[in-house]
Image (tube, rainbow, N blue to C red):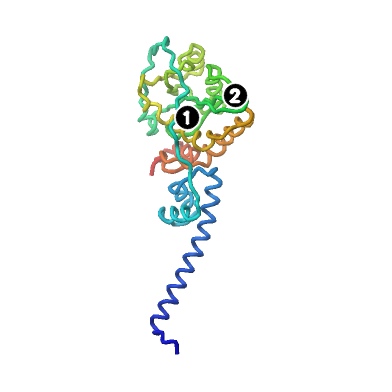
Amino acid sequence: MLGVDRKRFHRWRRDHREFEGRAAADECLAALITRIHAESGGAYGAVRVTVAVRREGLVVNRKRVARIMRERGIQGVTRRRRRSLTRPDGKAGSGPGLAAPPVRRMRAGRAAGRGHHLMGVPTGEGWVYLAVLLDLCTREVVGWATAARQDAALVIAALGTALRTGHLAEGATVHTDRGAQYTSGAYRRELARMGARQSLSRSGSCLENAPAESFFASLRTEIGRRFWTTRRVAVDAIDRWVGVFYNTRRLHSAIGYRTPAEARLQHRHGLPLVA
């Protein structure tokens, strides 16, 4: 009566059902993507969202995730180049035994290494400076401290945090740049008291501190571009980002898109960190 071919009609009905099924599946996936993106503080792009979706037990293609994010206006944050706040101490020498460390071996988990670095964020009451001690093997922040001044007391406080939590073992190598805080007598005495060995980057060699620079680039990108009304509010936000999100939830590309806490457990059991 309608002049429609029977086979063509059944083919159309089958394709229409498949389209409706894909659309419904996309809606469910979009809800999951939205939740993962929100839990990351809006930081995750398509690659990390895809990994997070797969960790939920779903088999999904990165291009499909990128399409759904693009259609719904979901975007991750992008990095911008920032100036360094570390100032070298021209009067400080390298000292005995302070050569550049075997950073590659530290990253591969064949040597115990820590990287120490600092940055600052602006607030309505002035700057807040953050010093961190980063495990070069697992990328976990094992010690951190905040203060209104970037001096030796700040970086020593970060060392103390790592020591109290048991993350700074005797004989560990602590690698830093040549900032005045790290070449000060107080800092070196504190390392000696803890039984740690100091290592300094070579002048003009930014790649030797690449893991710390990458960490602070992520922090600046994901929360550091905000303006904090008070130092207390900024410190609380930094503590939550480092201690709760970065160490236990954030997927890190250098360790096979695992969290630093997961990488520490795998390293402790002798398992490879990069799949």
Residue 79 in picture, x, y percent from top left: 45, 37
Q: Amino acid at mark 2?
A: Gly
Where residue 232 sits in the image (x, y, percent)?
64, 29
Query: Which part of the image, by quadrant, shows the C terminus?
Result: top left
Q: Residue furthest bottom?
A: 1
* Marker disc for residue 243: none
Of residues 132 and 66, the one nearer the viewer is: 66
117 above or below 5? above
Q: CA distance from mark 1 to mark 2?
A: 26 Å
**Residue placed farthest to the top in the image?**
91
Give x and y (percent) for residue 22: 46, 65
The residue wearing badge 2 is 126
- Structural crowding at the residue carrying mark 2, measured as other residues with C-alpha within 10 Å and reported as few (<14), some (14–19) or many (≥20): some
Q: Nearer the viewer, residue 271 or 135?
A: 135
The residue lying toward the viewer, choosing from 175 and 40, is 40
Quadrant including the N terminus: bottom left
- What amino acid is at disc 1? Leu
Residue visible at 39% across and 13% down in the picture: 94
Q: Say left or right for 38 vs 272.
A: right
What percent of the width, then of the height, locates residue 89?
44, 13
Nearest to the eye among marks 1 and 2: give it: 2
C-beta proximity under 8 Å, tags 1 and 2:
no
Q: To which residue does mark 1 refer?
A: 134
